């Protein structure tokens, strides 16, 4: 297999990310997949349903991964677990019912959660806090 400098760069950048940066990238991907799906659902074109399904499943996989990384030693992990379950449930409903409004509801919630994590990561890198979920 030939050397691909772009893939090597991507792999290296992922390996050197802080946990907060990695989490932000995962949230970026969830938001991207949900937004694409919402737009495609609004088109009401059955030919896009396979693409919508793939995008929504990608978001679900990431949310399930995030659930698996929660540290239940901290109280907030239970709240995040319930929130992730809610997001997954809404994604499933949106996919089955072909309802973009269900995605419209959760995208801002996920964005807000991402912003909170970004602020917490910035504070922790500045040495102001050392808590984790």
Image (spheres, rainbow, N blue to C red):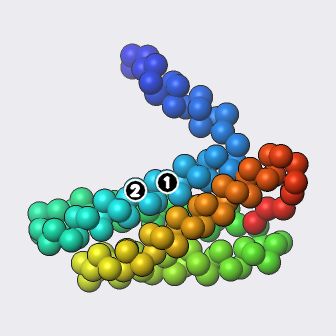
Relative to residue 26, is residue 97 depicted above or below?
Answer: below
Give the image location of residue 46, x and y in percent.
Answer: 12, 69
Residue drawn 46% across the image and 60% down it: 30
Q: Which residue is mark 1?
A: 28
Q: Nearer the viewer, residue 60 or 41?
A: 41
32 to the left or right of 79: left
Taking the spot 62% from the left edge, 47% from the top edge, the residue there is 22
- In whole angstroms, how far apart are the C-alphas of marks 2 and 1? 6 Å
Residue 21, above or below 131: above
> Looking at the figure, which quarter contains the C terminus?
bottom right
Height in image: 90 above or below 35? below
> Which residue shows up at 61% across the image and 81% down it?
82
Q: Can residue 16 be seen from the camera position used here?
A: yes
Position in image of residue 119 (x %, y %): 70, 57
| Neighbours of disc 2 within 10 Å: few (<14), some (14-19), many (20+) | some
How many circles with numbers are drawn on the protein?
2
The residue lying toward the viewer, choosing from 95 and 109, is: 109
Mark 2 sits on what residue?
Answer: 32
Do tag 2 and tag 1 residues touch (Cβ < 8 Å)? yes
- Asked which quadrant contains residue 14, the reply is top right
Q: Quadrant of residue 103?
A: bottom left
How busy is the neighbourhood of tag 1: few (under 14 within 10 Å), some, or many (20 plus)?
A: some
Q: State whether residue 54 appears in this view.
A: no
Q: Which mark is residue 62?
A: none
Q: Secondary structure at mark 1?
A: helix
Provide residue 51's location: percent of width, then percent of height: 24, 59
Image-based side of 33 in relation to 13, left or right: left
């Amino acid at each position: 297999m030939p050397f691909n400098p772009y893939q090597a760069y991507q792999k290296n950048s992922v390996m050197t990310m802080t946990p907060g940066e990695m989490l932000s990238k995962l949230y970026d991907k969830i938001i991207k997949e949900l937004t694409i799906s919402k737009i495609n659902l609004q088109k009401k074109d059955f030919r896009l349903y396979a693409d919508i399904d793939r995008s929504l499943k990608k978001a679900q996989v990431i949310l399930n991964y995030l659930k698996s990384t929660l540290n239940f030693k901290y109280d907030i992990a239970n709240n995040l677990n319930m929130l992730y379950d809610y997001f997954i449930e809404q994604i499933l409903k949106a996919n089955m019912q072909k309802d973009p409004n269900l995605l419209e509801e959760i995208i801002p919630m996920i964005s807000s959660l991402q912003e909170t994590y970004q602020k917490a990561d910035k504070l922790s890198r500045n040495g102001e806090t050392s808590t984790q979920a």
